[in-house]
Every structure is written in structure tokens, then in C-alpha cells.
Amino acid sequence: MHKARILIVDDEERIRDMIKEYISLEGYSVDEASDGVEALALFKQNKYSLIVLDIMMPRMDGWSVCTEIRKTSNVPVIMLTARGEEYDKLFGFELGVDDYIVKPFSPKELLARMKAIIRRSVSPLPEAAPENKAIFEGLVVEFAARNVYVDGNIIDLTPKEYELLNFFIRNPNRVFSREQLLEKVWGYDFAGNDRTVDTHVKMLRESLKDYRKFIVTVWGTGYKFEAGVKK
């Protein structure tokens, strides 16, 4: 099997060394960059399975680096940040960030998230249903093309938003807890990241506009997709 190659981008050498030491034990190949400009140069030269990217860096910050990467690649990105505000996370998820780790962090938790994201990117959610299209009133999903339309207009979802919507549609009228969604959609097998689910549900609802009504909050439990009869 191809050995995953990871790019670690952080202006603090001690953080790069800590991450590299920990994940190298898992057999990952690791490259390092101390700022955004160096990171983009390495990205253009090599193929990576995942990028761990700090936000606050000299010369070019993590937001700008992620924006440039997303112009040509869907490589998974985990952002390192000293801030955990929802605004920052929403902004990052809109850029196509896959996950966040807030400093200070546990290398064990970072490794677990990395493994889950890499596993999910290699083996994405199965397209189990035989049909190629689902229609719920003015919400249309074309599974093969991964296109989503709202009232005839195609909408731009992040990869994780699409996977979440796809999972809901494949499992209608079933209530899933946040922990179950983390496991099924993100691949995480540990607790403590409920806000990741809530943030993505919020973003997905905003994208679906009037059809946000199909994603129902079950208070004290989680969420379900409830859209009546599919055409």
C-alpha cells in the first residue's frame, strides 16, 4: 500500500518536530515547511495525502495557503489554530478545510483525526443506492456527478457538506447523534468534536436555503433527514 506523505506547515520548529516525531512512528513520510510560501513550493513539487497547516505564519498565512491549494487540489487539510471561535471555523470550512485542531493540542488526537481523514479520502462513503438522482421538491442531488441543485441553480458545497448531505439522504428519517455522524461521515471513533458536526450542519442548511427544513434537529439527540416522499 502507498505510504501516506504528510506536509506539516508551522513557523514553530518545536511544533513541527513534535508532530513529525509522533506521526513518523506510524510510518508516514513527512515534509516540513516553516511558512506559507515554502509550503506552496513543496505542494507544487510533491503529492501529499494530507496537509497540517498553521494559520498564523510569516510571509503567507494559512488561509491564503489553503485558498491557493483549493484552486487545484482537494487534498485533505487540517488547520492548526490558537483560536477556537466558531467564526474562524466557519471561514475555514468555507475555504474547504477538513478539520481543526486548537492549540495546545494532543498529538494523539491529531494522529487519530489524520488517520480518519486519510482513511475517508481513500475509501469515501459508498454510493449504495442504485438511483443516480434524488429529488425532494426543489432540491436535486445528482450522485454520480456530486452536483446539488436548489430551485434549478447548482450550489457550491464543500466536500464535507456534500458527504453529510449524501449520508442524510441515504438514511432518511433516522436520527443520528453527533457522535454517530462523526463516526459515519468523518470516520472519528472518539468523542469531543460535537461542534464540528453542528458547524457543518449550519453551513449545509444555509446552502440549502428553503430546503434546510429537511434537516431536522432532534433536541437532546442529534439530527435526521425528513423530506417526505422522494420523487
Image (cartoon, rainbow, N blue to C red):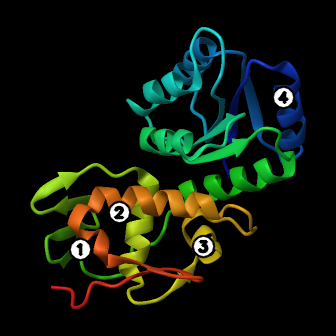
Q: Nearer the viewer, residue 89 or 220?
A: 220
Asked whether residue 27 appears in the rendered view, the answer is yes
* Residue under numbered circle 4: 15
Q: Nearer the viewer, mark 1 or mark 2?
A: 2
- Quick one: label 3 or label 2, which is nearer the N terminus? 3
In contact (CB < 8 Å): disc 3 and disc 2: no
Residue type indicated by callout 1:
Asn
Distance, label 3 to label 1, CA atoms, is: 28 Å
Residue 5 lies left or right of residue 92; in this view the side is right
Residue 121 position in % (x across, y down):
55, 54
Distance, label 4 to label 2, CA atoms, is: 36 Å
Depicted 130 relative to depicted 197: above or below: below
Residue 221 lies left or right of residue 141; in this view the side is right
* Residue under numbered circle 2: 205
Q: Quadrant of residue 79?
A: top right
Q: Nearer the viewer, mark 3 or mark 1?
A: 3
- Quick one: label 4 or label 2, which is nearer the N terminus? 4
SS for dot 3? helix
Residue type indicated by callout 3:
Arg
Residue type indicated by callout 2:
Arg
Q: Nearer the viewer, mark 1 or mark 4?
A: 4
Residue type indicated by callout 4:
Ile
* Residue under numbered circle 3: 178
Depicted 203 relative to depicted 37: above or below: below
SS for dot 1? loop
Q: Quadrant of residue 203?
A: bottom left
- Quick one: label 3 or label 4, which is nearer the N terminus? 4
Q: Nearer the viewer, mark 4 or mark 2?
A: 2
Residue 15 position in % (x across, y down):
84, 28
* Residue under numbered circle 1: 132
Distance, label 3 to label 4, CA atoms, is: 30 Å
- Quick one: label 3 or label 1, which is nearer the N terminus? 1
